[in-house]
Image (cartoon, grey):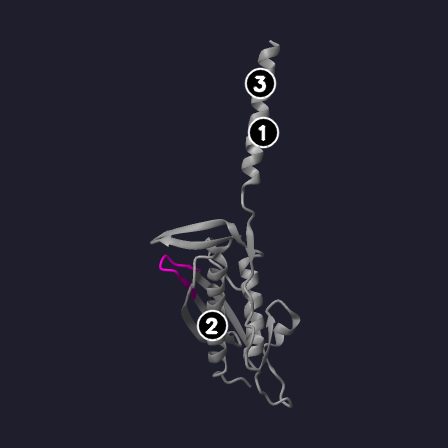
Amino acid sequence: MNTTRCLLRLGMASLLLLQAACIGSTSPARFYLLEPLAEVETQQTDSSRPRMILSLAPVRLPAYLDRSQIVSASDKNTYRLDEYHRWAENLGDNMTRVMLQDLSVLLPADVVINSTLRAKQAQLRLTVGILAFHVNPQGLAELSAQWQVSRDNEVVLSQHSSLRAAVNGDDMSLKVRALNQCLNQLSRDIAAMVKLLKVD
């Protein structure tokens, strides 16, 4: 009886040590954030005129992106969730903040989130829906988005943007950097179109 108990205890101890070794060898997850444009040309505006207010709605994401894991396309109709490379915050919130900062320096306007009090005074309102945001099997970062600008509850601009950027390596930080370039370029494209709109 004592021998059996000793063997059982030794077996349990060995199992626990094996589990601890497996856990100890697991790589920790790495976390990433998208960043706004580092350098842009400051808009030259007439300081005597009141600045336009642009209201930005929170960026909408499809369900496949609304998660912490970074998503990559591994084949046609096949996607991979990376458990060890994750977004440091909700991706939609991160994209909204980046676009808010980008547009604030790209446009001669005060850009505010649509839930703020100042948003009620906005001359233009921008909504952005992300359709795709991942690295494809060919190693290109892809961003596809549908966006609209409204004035007085009337849509005055509706566009679809498809952007790509090369990934210069297999490291996840390089993939995120390429995705970041796509998002910053989307902000540039939107700003260029908004500048063409007449605002009283």
Q: Position of residue 139 (x, y in %)?
A: 39, 60
In this view of the protein, can residue 27 be seen by the observer?
yes
Question: Does any portion of residue 155 appear in the rendered image?
Answer: no
Mark 2 residue element: helix
In this rendering, the answer to whether 5 lies above or below 34 is: above
For label 2, the residue is 185
Between circles 3 and 2, the one closer to the viewer is: 3
Which residue, given by chain and number where applicable, does mark 1 sit on?
Answer: 16
Residue type for callout 2:
Gln
Q: Which residue is identified by label 3?
A: 8
Which corner quadrant of the image does residue 137 belong to?
bottom left
How many C-alpha atoms fall within 10 Å of the one at disc 2: few (<14), some, or many (≥20)? many
Please identify the dominant SS of the magenta region: strand
Compare marks 3 and 2 and give the one earlier in the sequence.
3
> Residue 127: percent from the left, percent from the top?
51, 69
Viewer-closest of 148 and 139: 139
Rendered residue at 43%/73% (across/down): 158
Q: Is residue 122 left or right of residue 142?
A: right
Kind of element beneath mark 3: helix
Where 107 falls versus 77 (above or below)? below
Distance of label 1 from label 3 (alpha carbons): 12 Å
Please provide the residue range marked out in magenta: 134-144
